Amino acid sequence: MAKASQPLLIKRYASRRLYNTETSDYVTLEDIATFIRDGREVQIVDLKSGDDLTRQYLLQIIAEHESRGESVLPVNVLTDLVRSYTSQSMSVVPQFLAQSFEMLQSGQSKMMENMGAINPLTQMPGFEAMKTQQEAFMKAMTGGMMPGQGAPQGDQSRKSGDSAEDLSEIKAELAALQEKLSKLSK
């Protein structure tokens, strides 16, 4: 079996069928989406030309999910992305999006770690189910890449004041969640 650190190689044949080189079988776009959600990197190449088609297929997976009503990207974000392809700011957009997702992953990872550290919540019935659902949500939102599982860890040169501020925000969010949970349990 190939190393998990190496991308899973998918070859596209002239018939447009996708072939998993690890398992020697054909796969669908949904299979590829599952690999990615499970934290696996994939690379899709055209068998004849050798062209990398990964971006094209990842965009197709997103488009299919969006068309089925599984909307993650608001219309205004999609509109701005289209505009960025025709403007001079195009070079800034990919970096901005990458940093935004990195911050999201980092903040959500901290929140998940802190949820286990707060004793009153962990004693509540149903806490583990809620935590499991939150982890599944995080995995779906981050494409299966949680920090500590190969995802970027964020800017390590941040000031400790920024970390304390982030922690304060997370604690405030947790307090709000605690209040909601206590209302639900009554």
Image: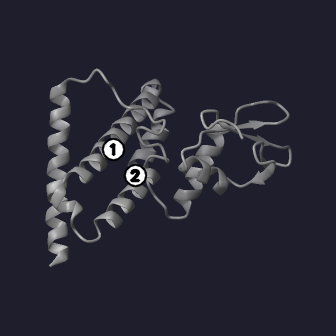
Query: Percent x, y for residue 48?
Result: 85, 34
Mark closest to the chain's N terminus, 1 or 2: 1
Q: Is residue 185 left or right of residue 102?
A: left
- Image point 51% across, 33% down: which residue? 85
Residue under label 2? 138
Q: Quadrant of the C terminus?
A: bottom left
Residue under label 1? 109
- Residue 129 in the image: above or below residue 47: below
- Distance from label 1 to label 2 (Cα)? 8 Å
Kind of residue indicated by mark 2 = Met
- Residue 55 in the image: above or below residue 159: below
Query: Percent x, y for residue 19?
Result: 79, 47
Query: Percent x, y for residue 10?
Result: 73, 42
**Does the CB distance between marks 1 and 2 fall below 8 Å?**
yes
Kind of residue indicated by mark 1 = Ser
Q: Is residue 172 left or right of residue 30?
A: left
Q: Toward which corner of the image does residue 97 lie, by quadrant?
A: top left
